[in-house]
Image (spheres, rainbow, N blue to C red):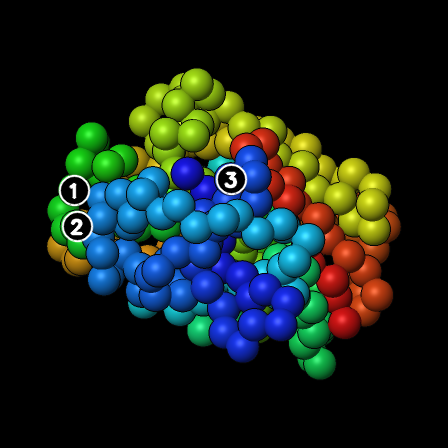
Amino acid sequence: MRFCVVRFEGAKAPVLARWTADGLIPLDAPPTLRGALESLGDAGLTELAAATDEAARPVESVERWLPPVPDPRTFRDFYAFEQHVKTCRRKRGQDMIPTWYDIPVFYFSNPCTMKGHLEPVSRPAATREMDFELEVGCVIGREVCNVSGTAAEEAIFGYLVLNDLSARDLQRQEMQCLLGPAKGKDFATAAGPCVVTPDELADVRVGAGRYDLEMVARKNGVEISRGNMSTLTFDFTSMIARASADVALFPGDVIGSGTVGTGCILELGPDVAGGWLEPGDTIELEIDRLGVLTTPVV
């Protein structure tokens, strides 16, 4: 199943909807995926969506796309694609860190600045090196703690496209103090347009928490990046095992993969990517089966 949060033309409030081949079916549920999962549980939400027989509304009737989870309790972003890590370190004249291969590492990003599909994002006033990051994310569907293996994978309600927007000059400055990234990632993360449950991806599953999904980034309509989710060094099962060690994960929590290889301007180089992001630019991130996430910069 595919779930999204939208506001239809003429409506006063957003709704959680199931996205089908016929269009969007509004659900009698809280209007965020976190709220629906907390209220109904992952199985209950799936049962409700399957049983709802309200007429589908055309996708064209959507006035605004909201992030499927606008208010996660926590948003952990990992660093799980080796190609991205190695390339960025090499550009800084640094060797690979052996410890990186021992544990999947993450940082906490801002859960309060999630942006939806087509929602404009302002370039931070202090940066001249605004970047995108092409990532896949997952939404936790049930409360878990100290899980691994099958239990970790079963905690995933669904997957979505993430754009971890970054201010590279701010990030570079703060990380000289051996903390961060923090302010360089603080201003926005785009997510959506929908969350896709694992059963929709079963035929391209290549291992626990890993799928053969092409990932593409286009800047102003021109492709500048292409990768594949299957190249994850640490799959989502490993990420959830690490994240849940000695701490609870809750329904609606968001976990990001980190950038796929070639999936940002920092890695490509601004000369190759046509420069850093500027007001007037548009970034489209597309992942097979998960959809296209579009972010205009203003």
Residue, x 69% and y 79% (percent of image)? 126
Residue, x 52% and y 48% (percent of image)? 56
**Residue 136 in view here:** no
The type of residue carrying mark 2 is: Val
Residue, x 64% and y 40% (percent of image)? 286
The type of residue carrying mark 1 is: Val
Q: Return the residue found at the far bottom.
A: 125
Distance from Cα at disc 3 to Cα at disc 1: 32 Å
Residue located beneath label 2 in the image:
144
Q: Mark 3 falls on what kind of element?
A: strand
180 left or right, relative to 151: right
The residue mark sitting in front, 3 or 1, is: 3
* N-term mark: 3 or 1: 3
Distance from Cα at disc 1 to Cα at disc 2: 7 Å
Q: Mark 1 falls on what kind of element?
A: loop
Q: Position of residue 225 (x, y in %)?
A: 71, 38
Residue, x 27% and y 35% (percent of image)? 153
Q: Do the residues under discs 1 and 2 have CB atoms within 8 angstroms?
A: yes
168 left or right, relative to 68: right
Q: Mark 3 packing: few (<14 Cα in 10 Å), some, or many (20+)?
A: some
Residue located beneath label 1 in the image:
147
Residue located beneath label 3 in the image:
20
Distance from Cα at disc 2 to Cα at disc 3: 29 Å
